[in-house]
Amino acid sequence: MAQLQSLTLDAGLHPGVSSLRRSLAVSCDAALGTLVEAVAATLVAVEIAILFSGIVARYCFDSPLVWSDELASMLFLWLAMLGAAVALRRGEHMRMTAVVALLPGGVQALLEVVATGAALTFLLCVAWPAYEFALEELFITTPALEITNAWRAAALPTGLGLMAAFAALRLLRTASLRLVALGLVAVAAVVAVFWLSEPVLRQLGNLNLLIFFVGVAGACVFSGVPIAFAFGLAVLGYLALATSTPLMVLVGRIDEGMSHLILLSVPLFVFLGLLIEMTGMARAMVGFLASLLGHVRGGLHYVLIGAMYLVSGISGSKAADMAAVAPVLFPEMKARGAKEGDLVALLSATGAQTETIPPSLVLITIGSVTGVSIAALFTGGLLPGVALAVLLCFVVWHRYRNEDLSHVRRATKSEIGRAFVIAFPAIALPFVIRAAVVEGVATATEVSTIGIVYAVLAGLLIYRQFDWRRLKPMLIETASLSGAILLIIGTATGMAWGLTQSGFSRSLAAAMTGLPGGAVTFMAVSIVAFVVLGSVLEGIPAIVLFGPLLFPIARAVGIHEVHYAMVVILAMGIGLFAPPFGVGYYAACAIGRVNPADGIRPILGYVLALFIGTIIVAAVPWISIGFLN
């Protein structure tokens, strides 16, 4: 252990060489990173412009631009791959660090190198198959633009190459070359063991599913390897060592997973959420709710629950939702005597409670990978969030029923009216978005573009709060978060394909449909499973990996697919936002600037309420499907 810790100090042995190495690495990283970020940010802006132009041409001039969707789709893959490269450079790929954080500092430093080395290994292994895949696309001509599809497919080898470059530069910027060497040797040793075991692995049949998709993927996830690359390594090892499938097939599955046109709404909703925060629309919503309930015992806690319900789902990031609401409410809540631990516990609980609120990216992802109607999911997601909100409010009432509010002034009717007038354009936006999709007026992608234009105009003309200097960082952040999400979807699609081709899905379906108790047992098992998956994989990776397998089983045992979607989303939310493994909980602590230990006890009551609410939603299908046509 002491040897590992001493490795981080090794740079001092050769300060001149180490300093020069780091300086060159930092310079190259900054130059390349600035270029890639600029291109990725530009692609986000161009996508918005293309899609909005198509909407205007279609609805205003009745002259649709037949090439707009095709061009947007081509640029979307470039945006996803470049965004994933930006996310790797900025360290923003989703990963599980709860286990690593418990280890000594020297071991953490070594595992950081191992995680980067593992990602680099995956990228180098699929770089050439990605290039071959792009060459194959030379022979395909797009119908509208009439150009070769290789222009689109070239995004794959380009993005993978850039990610490999950023991973290598990150290693060069590490404090100790000895530490880097030790980490890379560890990765190489593991790869060598698997490579030499190929003859044995090929004779094990479907036992390889357990070795690669549970063993390899699990070991990577728990050691801190970003989830996208953990999935990628698992399916790469399975295809290369246990089957005769060409690796170009894996690249094709990644391309397929990332290229669903409905996923184009992901970066648009992310950017819309950032706009809502920047233009002051989120603050206006919270201000109105506070004027209504601020004088009630526990009133600001109810406001927090209501504000998260309104804001949730638009940004595509629960961290962005929480960051838009918490800074507005927390100072006053603390002034009224609320404990920091309880505040961050409720903030985390509302993150789980609002997972089903449209236009949640989890709902969009479910629709894209399972074929469930997006409009039906948007309709079905509203009441489950209300059901859980009621139970959270009951916990708040119980805890704050004796709160002293003698020093709090009740807002007058005129003040409430003024706050409503100010907040109305902001409050209306989420409902307009949901209604437009549910009523079939516009697709999720179209309505997200309309929402962006609406938010820009509201910020400029109504709220007079629009910081032009923040646009570029917001566009870069949009590309980064979108790339991280989409790469997970791509590699998880490859893993799901491997599971399907192996026959595992048929075996799983037979086992699950044969459970005693039928639909009730299946639902109970799903709740437990997705609570665990939510704490380990987060929402979107778990849905992409297991959605195509479990949703057909749910239909087979007589469970409505929208009802099932709501239950598994809520179960995942509990896992995602409950300590000790839920990364959403630690994000809430970071936003609230609260020690995670302070929120452990207060969150237990909220988690119990969420679990009871999930059981109620599971037991009463009408909550999810009562308003479907």
Image (cartoon, rainbow, N blue to C red):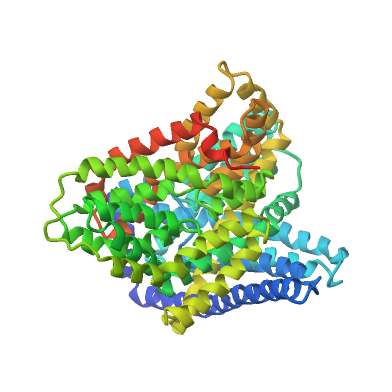
Nearer to the camera, 514 or 202: 514
Residue 574 position in % (x across, y down) = 41, 41
Q: Is residue 586 above or below residue 463?
A: above
Which image quadrant is residue 469 in?
A: bottom left
Left or right: 74 as drawn, with respect to 263: right
Nearer to the camera, 480 or 270: 270
* Residue at the (77%, 77%) spot, across then down: 61
Residue 224 position in % (x across, y down) = 44, 50
Return the residue found at the far front: 413
Residue 472 position in % (x across, y down) = 50, 79
Left or right: 339 as drawn, with respect to 100: left
Quarter of the figure that contains the C terminus: top right
Q: Residue 4, can we see it?
A: no
Residue 187 position in % (x across, y down) = 51, 50
Q: In this view, does 185 lie above or below 607?
A: below
Left or right: 505 as drawn, with respect to 421: right
Nearer to the camera, 33 or 398: 398
Which image quadrant is residue 17 in?
A: bottom left
Return the residue found at the far top: 516
Total marks shown come to 0
Q: Residue 488, can we see it?
A: yes
Left or right: 320 as drawn, with respect to 133: left
Q: In this view, does 511 lie above or below 482?
A: above
* Residue at the (64%, 50%) spot, across then down: 374
Nearer to the camera, 79 or 285: 285
Q: In this view, does 591 lie above or below 63?
A: above
* Residue at the (69%, 42%) spot, across then down: 497
